[in-house]
Amino acid sequence: MMGKIASIVLVALLASSLSARDYHVSVDGRDTNDGSASKPLKTISAAAQRAQAGDVITVHAGTYRERVTPPRGGESDSKRIVYRAAKGDKVIIKGSEAVKGWQKVQNDTWKVVIPNGFFGAFNPYSDLIRGDWFSPKGRNHHTGAVYLNGHWLVETAKLDDVLKPAGDASGYAPGDGQYLLNVAWLRPGEGSGNAERIPAAGFAAQQGVQKAPCSEGGECIGWIEQGDWARYEKIDFGQGVKQVEIRAASETTGGIIEIRLDTPDGELLGTCSVPNTGGWQSWRSFVAKIKPVSGVKTLCLVFTGPSDAQLWFGQVDETNTTIWAQFKGVNPNEAEVEINVRRTVFYPDKPGINFITVRGFTMMHAATPWAPPTAEQIGLIGTHWSKGWIIENNEIGYSTCVGITLGKYGDQWDNTSQNTAEGYVETINRALKNGWSKENIGHHIVRNNHISYCEQAGVVGSMGAVFCTITGNVIHDIHMRRLFSGAEMAGIKIHGAIDTEISHNHIYRTCLAVWLDWMAQGTHVTRNLFHDNDTGLFVEVDHGPFLVDNNLFLSGRALLDMSEGGAYVHNLFAGPLEPHPELSRETPFHKAHSTEVAGLQKIEGGDDRFFNNIFVGSNGLAPYDKAARPMQMSGNVFLKGAKPAKSEQAPLVLPNFDPEIKLVEEKDGVYLHVAQPPSAGITPEGGGATRLVTTELLGRAKVPDLPYEQPDGSPLRIDTDYLGKKRSRKNPTPGPFEDPSQGKLVLRVW
């Protein structure tokens, strides 16, 4: 009898495998073909219309200009629909079209006139970026874009700017986005007598800048970007001054310092151009000529990017779309010039298209909309309120707003929350009625992708990113142009990361590497490399339990903590930590491993755990002395002036030890250069004694009254390090690396 049943099962499996098809797509194919290897289809969309659960769509080398809208998905993890690039082939899917017929206007400016019918039902050049928590900074922004040889130009606020010679218009960030420069000090020049240096870190007010150690002593200001400023009061210009000396440094292409009276938009006295000086601490003095000034004044330094950005401007009437663009030294009719045409590249037009794999493509150029948590979130590629997608091994770039969305569906309440917490609570309640559950939503895998050049976020998900894994991705150059702003920008920005793992990612040159906003419960952030970001991690109005372990925080600010119930274990923090309570909002916590809301609570602050971390410079854990709820702290190491909290018993404090942290990119990877502190101090007698971190040690998060455990409910043991090495059970080494050699180390971290 058992043999007969086995035979029936085998026959069923064989029939299933025989019925599954492999559709082939080629730029030389025809959509009237049968999709076989010998008679391929021409478009991916034609294959998508034919594919059924279990089928594979193999796309061969070439560029495909289309939006793929899968009409159906798979039936299970083992019977999915797979979209894949043929092995070894470069397959590019673009939301843009190439445009010729440019006519020279003046200076570096050309224009093209395109009939509106070219765009069909969607014209990105009349489509404004807008929505909840969006700030346009006083001007219009469109989802359209112009690309020269694959890289985008910058949209101007007005036609006059694009008609100027390239580089003459001010107020536009560099096209590739970057930090600009550091400033150590300034002082009035000749004519003011023996004027003293004014420390740049001694500002009276600022926007965007951060203080940092200065190699020449004291502090400088750094992490300066387009539009940042710093104001200095009571500067004595004596009987009259015609110049200002500024001590500055830059590792990038530098920037321009506008010297203004009183305010950021005050009278322009002069400018100071700062080039690449060879490093962030390679200081040079620059003398800027200014209009004559005397007496005691208030001075404002305004920072702008190098004025070499090439610009574009669009205008749509009833018949045509006209685009003006700057092409310095280039005839656009002889170059590759493309413009955004499609809203997205790969995105279902309805929810519930489950179990799809997208593998091995280069996907670029999409006119994506702003994606707040209270609206449908459309990315260059997105899952649209579904379950079980795998997005892996893709190159994803140049999305007006977001690269990958794991977000919510759309409805009549999109963008109507009036930017309120109460509005998002109602969004959550509606989502629960629309199937937000462990059974229906999430369980996506986003791995080994390269995501770049997105002006809102690399990965976004409001409630749709539950029970997911986001791992092995390289994410960079996110929200670096800063032409608009809002509250949704990060390398990874997730609302409701319930039981979601964010691991082994390399995130740099972003405004914020990872932002966990609301409902981070059971979330695990582990073994990530964060560097050259404004902020490494922002946890906002989460009640825990969530775990952050074995990460390298090498950004300007390591942690912005407006949450409670977090566990921080074996991390390297090389920037300040800023805890803040949040008593103006009540936000949800959930039943264990579930989307079901258990209650709402304000963030009093505290109830965090810090075990076996290393803190370098800045404030260490001292800011947590003001935490409202009790903290747990043990086994932490404080170097280069970092300070422990008063409540930690026997921390290891080495205020004069500098680990000389440096990150170096080589041909075969990224290497961390770091000096280890003397191991003799890490003993029960000398401070810094450690314990293996487990579910039992971490206890229970106060508000939800839940333990720190695996998504399946099994206990946690933090028994491996950043590199996967086993940790000592009795006395694990503080920081991300277990028992490294003494002295100066060079470790490959990516």
Image (cartoon, helix red, strand yellow):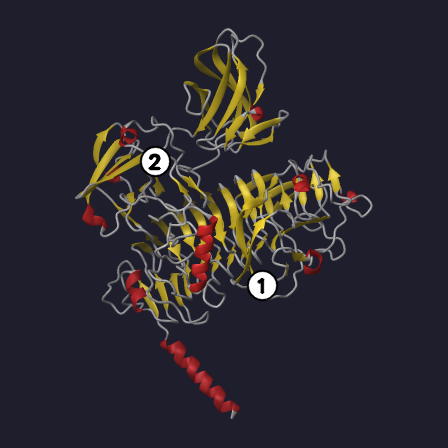
Tag 2 secondary structure: loop
**Foreground residue among 646 and 679:** 646
Between 626 and 409, the residue placed more toward the observer is 626
Viewer can see residue 393: no
Q: Are marks 1 and 2 in contact (CB under 8 Å)?
A: no
User: Would residue 660 appear left or right of 129 to someone viewing this image?
Assistant: right
- Point 31% across, 56% down: residue: 67
Name the mark on residue 592: 1
The local secondary structure at tag 1 comes to loop
Residue 129 falls in which quadrant of the image?
top left
Indicate whether 179 appears above or below 195: below
Residue 668 placement (x, y as % from top left): 54, 47
Q: Position of residue 184 (x, y in %)?
A: 56, 24
Give left or right: position of 204 versus 263. Answer: right
Q: Residue at x 27, y 43 (%)?
A: 125
**Residue at image mark 2:** 139
Q: Decide: few, some or many residues near mark 1? Use Cα within 10 Å; few <14, some 14-19, many ≥20.
A: many
Residue 717 higher or lower than 38, as above or below: above
At label 2, counting other C-alpha atoms closer than 10 Å, the crowd grade (few under 14, some 14-19, many 20 or more) is few
